[in-house]
């Protein structure tokens, strides 16, 4: 009888245990991972990586991620240079100072 109880208990607990890494499905990429991979591939002019990263998320999500990455990069660079984000953004794009 106890063997039967142990078998039922181990079956029930088996469903609650984490799966082994080899059997676990690959974790999907999030939009920030996709944006980082996409932008770095664009900077390196690597079309194969650009296409791969673009396929990880929807075009809308990728656009949002790239926009967020650009904002964070401009803010970080502005702090580093002790300049305004507007000045840094214009300089990065080769535009004259406003």
Image (cartoon, rainbow, N blue to C red):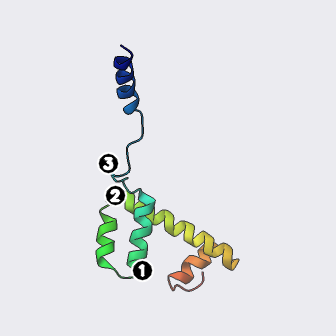
x and y, in percent, of residue 61 in the image = 38, 57
Say if 12 sits above or below 54 in the image.
above
Residue at the location (38% across, 76% down)? 41
- Single out the mark in the foreground, 3 or 1: 3
Find disc 3 in the rendering and name its residue: 23
Question: What residue is drawn where x is 46% and y is 65%?
Answer: 67
Residue farthest to the top?
Answer: 1
Q: Where residue 43 is drawn, which disc sits there?
A: 1
Mark 3 vs mark 2, foreground winner is: 3
- The foreground one among 85 and 80 is 80
Label 1 residue SS = helix
Q: Give the labeled residue for mark 2.
A: 57
Image: 34 above or below 92: above
Q: Position of residue 6 (x, y in %)?
A: 39, 22
- Mark 2 residue element: loop
Residue 65 appears at what percent x and percent y?
A: 44, 61
Residue at 45% from the left image edge and 68% from the top image edge = 36
Instruction: Report the Cα–Cα distance between label 1 and label 2.
Output: 19 Å
Q: Residue at x 53, y 82 (%)?
A: 92
Question: In the picture, which quadrant includes the N terminus?
Answer: top left
Q: Which quarter of the picture shows residue 35?
A: bottom left
Disc 3: CA contacts within 10 A as few (<14), some (14-19) or many (>=20): few
Q: Are marks 3 and 2 in contact (CB under 8 Å)?
A: no
Counting other residues with Cα less than 10 Å from the Cα at mark 2, is it few (<14), some (14-19), or many (20 or more)?
many
In the rendered view, tell whether residue 32 sits above or below residue 50.
above
Q: Earlier in the sequence, mark 3 or mark 2?
A: 3
């Amino acid at each position: 009888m106890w063997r039967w109880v142990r078998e039922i208990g181990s079956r029930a607990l088996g469903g609650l245990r984490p799966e082994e890494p080899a059997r676990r499905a690959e974790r999907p990429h999030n939009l920030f991972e996709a944006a980082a991979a996409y932008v770095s591939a664009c900077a390196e002019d690597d079309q194969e990586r650009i296409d791969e990263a673009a396929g990880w998320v929807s075009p809308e999500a990728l656009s949002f991620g790239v926009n967020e990455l650009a904002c964070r990069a401009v803010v970080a660079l502005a702090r580093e240079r002790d300049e305004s984000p507007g000045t840094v953004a214009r300089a990065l794009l080769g535009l004259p100072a406003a």
